[in-house]
């Protein structure tokens, strides 16, 4: 069945350093979403990407959808302590209600 | 604001008990989902529902059932709880399947002893 893998599983960075998490699907996706889960919290929607090669920015966060629509990345520039949490990608294929979540990348930012 | 409310934040049950986890959303969303979250495994879909009385199996439905008698309420049922069902359970809802964001409840941490 469809699988969505994320790397790395964990990342510790010094405050001010950049951070990137990668999401890879075994099948072509119709769209991909990104969520952030703060420690002790629940996942909160960040963004959705639909088009091949799409790039979207939210302040220090840059999201990219691969040309083949099988991979995606989230890049954070100059991390802050408020960026701490687990970042999940979630992809879906056309014709289905199901989103398959990635395994998540847990980010720790050291002040 | 959309609100998705799960009935309990923490729950401790005994092996073999029948367990009900309730989820209510207040925004008239068609689609509702139940996930379980385990360290290193991300969120795994148990069941989802795209309409009242409609349900479909997710990736790990074994040992679970669901009920959706009203649009706003989606219940997850553990017929006979086992220790390997100890986990964080997350309910989510979304307005429609046309590429919209999912809103999650606060989660229920279930411990089966």
Image (spheres, coloured by chain):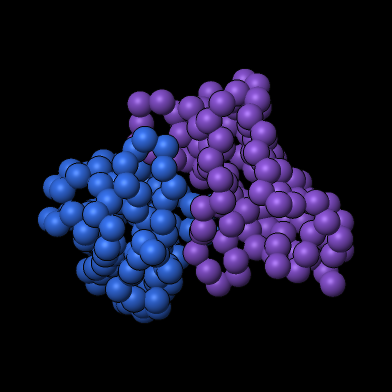
Chain colours: A purple, B blue
Q: Which x, y percent locates residue A36? A: 59, 57
Q: Who's the residue at 28% across and 62% down the image?
A: B25
Q: Who's the residue at 63% across and 58% down the image?
A: A86
Relative to B47, residue A1 above or below: above
User: Observer-nearest residue: A30 or B9?
Assistant: A30
Q: Which x, y percent locates residue A93? A: 44, 28
Is residue A102 at least partly visible in the picture?
no
Q: Which x, y percent locates residue A81? A: 75, 69
User: Observer-nearest residue: B104 or B65?
Assistant: B104
Q: Who's the residue at 84% across and 72% down the image?
A: A111
Q: Who's the residue at 34% across and 76% down the image?
A: B8
Q: Which x, y percent locates residue A106? A: 68, 58
Total number of numbered discs in the rendering: 0
Q: Is residue B86 left or right of residue B56?
A: right
Q: In this view, does B12 lie to the left or right of A103?
A: left
Image quadrant of residue A57? Answer: top right
Relative to A8, residue A54 above or below: above
Is residue A45 at least partly visible in the picture?
yes
């Amino acid at each position: 069945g469809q699988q969505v893998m994320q790397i790395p599983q964990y990342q510790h960075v010094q405050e001010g350093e950049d951070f990137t998490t990668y999401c890879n699907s075994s099948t072509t996706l119709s769209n991909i979403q990104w969520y952030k889960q703060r420690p002790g919290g629940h996942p909160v929607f960040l963004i959705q990407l639909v088009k091949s090669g799409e790039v979207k920015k939210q302040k220090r966060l840059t999201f990219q959808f691969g040309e083949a629509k099988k991979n995606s990345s989230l890049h954070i520039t100059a991390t802050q302590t408020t960026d701490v949490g687990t970042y999940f990608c979630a992809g879906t294929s056309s014709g289905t209600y199901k989103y398959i979540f990635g395994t998540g990348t847990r980010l720790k930012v050291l002040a | 604001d959309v609100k998705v409310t799960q009935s309990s934040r923490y729950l401790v049950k005994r092996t073999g008990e029948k367990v009900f986890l309730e989820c209510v959303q207040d925004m008239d969303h068609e689609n509702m989902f139940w996930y379980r979250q385990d360290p290193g495994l991300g969120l795994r879909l148990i069941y989802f529902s795209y309409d009242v009385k409609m349900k479909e199996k997710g990736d790990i439905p074994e040992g679970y059932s669901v009920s959706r008698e009203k649009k706003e309420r989606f219940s997850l049922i553990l017929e006979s709880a086992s220790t390997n069902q100890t986990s964080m359970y997350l309910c989510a809802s979304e307005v429609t399947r046309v590429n919209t964001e999912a809103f999650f409840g606060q989660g229920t941490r279930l411990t089966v002893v």
